[in-house]
Image (cartoon, helix red, strand yellow):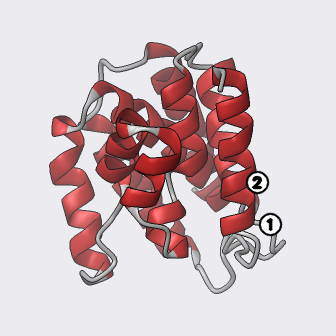
């Protein structure tokens, strides 16, 4: 199977696995919009041409959110993709506060490929915090998420200057919007 077919298979796989999931925002967008946005950010802004990284971007939340296993990812998309996905997957058995703390701690130690996926993920999530915030999130919670996202990204600096510049621009806009 060629790499373009593999990328499209990953998009289809992610769409099927996330078919019952919605984004937390009040618009209730289909969840698949998020991994599609992350992969698009990596390709268009980050100039990522490595198909394994783009495939991992498409699949980055499947293990965490859908019950898909890393073994399934490995069998369908290969060891490298599975490894990247595993690196960016939170352990949902841990309390949310601990998972957030571990993301900050682990960020500097991720592979370059996982850092790129994580950068795209944080850009997408912070955009949503501004444009389509989860219901019930007051300004303080939204500001706290942005601060935490910045802490994660600060541990990955030097990975992709174009994605980092977009992240900084979005954080600046977010701070201006939220005051």
- Which residue is disc 1 drawn over? 30
* Contact flag, marks 2 and 1 (Cβ < 8 Å): yes
Of 3 and 96, nearer the camera is: 3
Image quadrant containing the N terminus: top right
Asked whether residue 172 appears in the rendered view, the answer is no
Q: Residue at x 55, y 73 (%)?
A: 66
Q: Residue at x 81, y 67 (%)?
A: 29
- Which residue is disc 2 drawn over? 33
Q: Eyeballing the image, is 53 above or below 82?
A: above
Asked whether residue 56 appears in the rendered view, the answer is yes
Image quadrant containing the C terminus: bottom right
Q: Position of residue 134 (x, y in %)?
A: 66, 75
Q: Residue at x 28, y 32 (%)?
A: 156
User: Residue 94 occupies which quadrant of the picture?
Assistant: bottom left
Horizontal arrangement in the rendering, residue 26 relative to residue 116 (left or right): right
Pointer 2 local density, CA inside 10 Å: few below 14, some 14–19, many at least 20: some
User: Residue 111 occupies which quadrant of the picture?
Assistant: top left
Secondary structure at numbered mark 2? helix
Secondary structure at numbered mark 1? loop
Horizontal arrangement in the rendering, residue 62 relative to residue 78 (left or right): right
Of 135 and 56, nearer the camera is: 56
CA distance separating discs 2 and 1: 6 Å
């Amino acid at each position: 199977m060629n790499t373009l077919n593999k990328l499209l298979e990953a998009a289809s796989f992610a769409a099927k696995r996330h078919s019952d999931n919605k984004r937390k925002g009040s618009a209730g967008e289909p969840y698949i919009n998020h991994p599609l946005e992350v992969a698009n950010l990596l390709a268009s802004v980050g100039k990522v041409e490595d198909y394994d990284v783009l495939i991992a971007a498409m699949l980055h939340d499947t293990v965490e959110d859908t019950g898909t296993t890393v073994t399934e990812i490995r069998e369908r998309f290969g060891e490298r993709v599975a490894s990247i996905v595993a690196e960016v997957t939170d352990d949902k058995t841990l309390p949310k506060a601990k998972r957030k703390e571990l993301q900050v701690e682990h960020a500097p130690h991720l592979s370059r490929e996982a850092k790129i996926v994580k950068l795209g993920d944080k850009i997408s999530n912070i955009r949503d915090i501004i444009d389509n915030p989860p219901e019930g999130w007051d300004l303080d919670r939204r500001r706290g998420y942005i601060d935490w996202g910045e802490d994660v990204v600060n541990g990955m600096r030097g990975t992709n200057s174009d994605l980092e510049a977009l992240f900084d621009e979005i954080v600046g806009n977010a701070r201006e919007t939220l005051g």
